[in-house]
Amino acid sequence: MIKINDKKFLIVIPAYNESDSIEFVIDELTLHMPHVDILVVNDNSSDDTGIIVQRMNTICLNLCVNMGYASAVQTGILYAVRNDYDYVLQFDADGQHIATQAQRLIDHLIKTDADIVIGSRYFSSNDFKQSFFRMLGTKLFSKIVKLSTGMRITDPTSGFQILSKRVIKRYADMDGFPEYPDANLIIAMFKRGYKIEEIPVKMRSRIAGDSMYNGIIAPVKYVAIMLYSVLLILFRRKGLD
Amino acid sequence: MSTEILYIITGVLLVGFILYHTLKKNLLEKESLIWLLVCIPILVFAFYPKSMIVISQWLGITYPPSLFFFVTIAVLFIIVLRLNIQLSKLKRQVTVLTQHVAINQAEIKQLKDKIHVDKN
């Protein structure tokens, strides 16, 4: 286990049917971040994702049933807590996140001593494409975060985040980790006094597969669930639990 | 009269059905007790149909069978909600179990690999 500034870092990659992109993602991370451990949480993929990861000598957690994105992320966080990691970097398996940008998140976290650093794709221009409904949802929840916390978070749906030890312990113990851990979690963590920062990062369009927010029904469902979750957090004194 | 017999048969069959599954251990004792409590008003209305009329008049309900439907729907609503609460709890428990199984399996594999390397 290699350390940066005496701290242990773990990259958590939740993956569901990402056999077309996972090899590229791991290769890129290994090339640019050889000092960081990589963990893939295979969310019961029906393709060869798990086999590819194991062949690449990367740590792989195989969920025996499909649990969804949030549970896969939380599984990685649980692993990090059990193995005493100091920081967890969430990284997508579809190739959207760029390995060289991950180092920027780490640097910012160390520099500012923040608890959560979010990589935003809307600070600077990039070739990232997203659907109209997703864009609408992002803007809506960005506004909601601003109104409820006063923080300017331009990309609350970004899964490109680095989390401090305090946060990973909190997430690991959380009873009922939200199905969509986005704006709701940002507001809940802010209410609990965690320091949250956002920095611009570049992202690519996904290499293969479809986004879980494609179509009309999925984004509408997402907005409804997220609005309800945010309302519950605002009404609960302690946020999520 | 035939309607009353139908009510009685239905009520008795329901109680029998619940007790059968409780004895076969298909239904937890606590759950079985709740269902038996639900059967009480059904049996009361079946054996004493006039009770429905008396209670309806007391509550100001002009059509007595409405009381039966109201009670049934309210009770079923509560039971379905209760089941949903239990389902949510079970879902969370399954998530925790699945997560721990995955981590344990990975750790077992790592230990096995380590033992294999040590042996060679």
Image: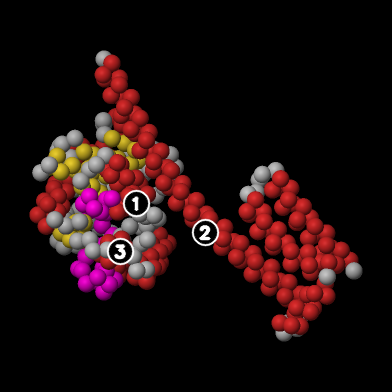
Mark 2 in CB contact with mark 1 (< 8 angstroms): no
Relative depth, front residue between B12 and A117: B12
Discs 1 and 3 carry the same chain letter: yes
Up the image or down, A170 lies above or below A32; here it is below
Secondary structure, mark 2, is helix
Q: Chain of mark 2?
A: B
Question: Which residue is tagged 3?
Answer: A188
- Tell me where residue A228 appears, x and y as whole percent: 40, 68
Q: Please name the amino acid that badge 3 sits on.
A: Ala
- Tell me where residue B86 appears, x and y as whole percent: 53, 55
Q: Residues within 10 Å of mark 3 (few under 14, many from 20)?
A: many
Q: Residues within 10 Å of mark 2 (few under 14, many from 20)?
A: few
Tag on residue A173? 1
Secondary structure, mark 3, is helix
Q: Chain of mark 1?
A: A
- Tell me where residue A90 appears, x and y as whole percent: 25, 49
Q: What is the distance, in whole Å, between disc 2 and disc 3 at their CAs? A: 23 Å
Q: What is the distance, in whole Å, between disc 1 and disc 3 at their CAs? A: 14 Å
Q: Nearer the viewer, mark 2 or mark 1?
A: 1
Tag on residue B85? 2
Q: Residue drawn at (17%, 45%), measured in percent from left and top?
A: A99
Report whether B78 appears left or right of A232.
Answer: right
Q: Please name the amino acid that badge 2 sits on.
A: Ile
In the picture, the quarter occupied by the C terminus of chain A is bottom left
Magenta segment includes A202: no
Q: Please report the bounds of the magenta region as a residue range.
A: A142-169
Q: Quadrant of residue A39?
A: top left
Discs 2 and 1 carry the same chain letter: no
Secondary structure, mark 1, is helix
Relative depth, front residue between B52 and A140: B52
Report whether B47 appears left or right of A79.
Answer: right
Q: Please name the amino acid that badge 1 sits on.
A: Asp
